[in-house]
Amino acid sequence: MVDGGAGARPPYSGGGWSVTRRRPAHLPTRPTWRCRACGIAWPCSVAKLNLLAEYREDRAALLDYLTTLRDEAVAQLSAELPDGVPRADLTERFTGWASAR
Ligand SMILES: [Zn+2]
């Protein structure tokens, strides 16, 4: 079931699943979409592990959530970069790792 994300779980930007308290959580910064903790393109490996743990009971919800973030990233990165960002690249980056298996 896909509800478009509007009624889905709230974004976790509040730090709900933050594992470490002293370090910044592995959350995306906007509009650059880099990990707040690692500085690399989000989701980093830690963020992926956290998400997999958070959504281990509901992979469909995880993919729905990641797709919502993907759409947000496409819009923001396209505005940031003169040449934009290929949507397919962001799809692989945001959801490719979660849809496997
Ligand atoms: Zn990170």
Image (cartoon, grey):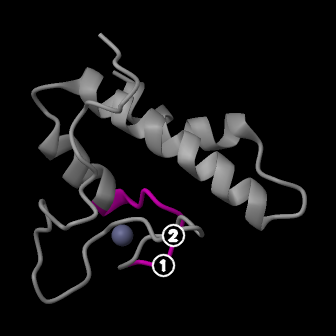
Whether residue 93 is visible to the viewer of this picture, yes or no, is no
Please give the residue where the numbered disc 1 appears in the rendered image. Answer: 39
| CB atoms of marks 2 and 1 within 8 Å | yes
The residue carrying mark 1 has its beta carbon less than 8 Å from ligand 1: yes
Q: Quadrant of the C terminus?
A: top left
Which residues lie in the magenta part? 38-46
80 vs 24: above or below: above
Q: Amino acid at mark 2?
A: Arg
Any magenta on residue 45? yes
The secondary structure that most of the magenta stretch takes on is: loop
Residue at x 82%, y 53% (from the top left corner): 84
67 vs 20: above or below: above
Q: Amino acid at mark 1?
A: Gly
The picture quadrant for ligand 1 comes to bottom left
Quarter assignment of residue 43? bottom left
- Residue 73, label in figure: none
Q: Position of residue 73 (x, y in %)?
A: 58, 51
- Residue 34, label in figure: 2
Q: Residue furthest right?
A: 83
Residue at x 40%, y 24% (from the top left corner): 4
Give the distance between the C-alpha atoms of the residues marked 2 and 1, in whole angstroms. Answer: 5 Å
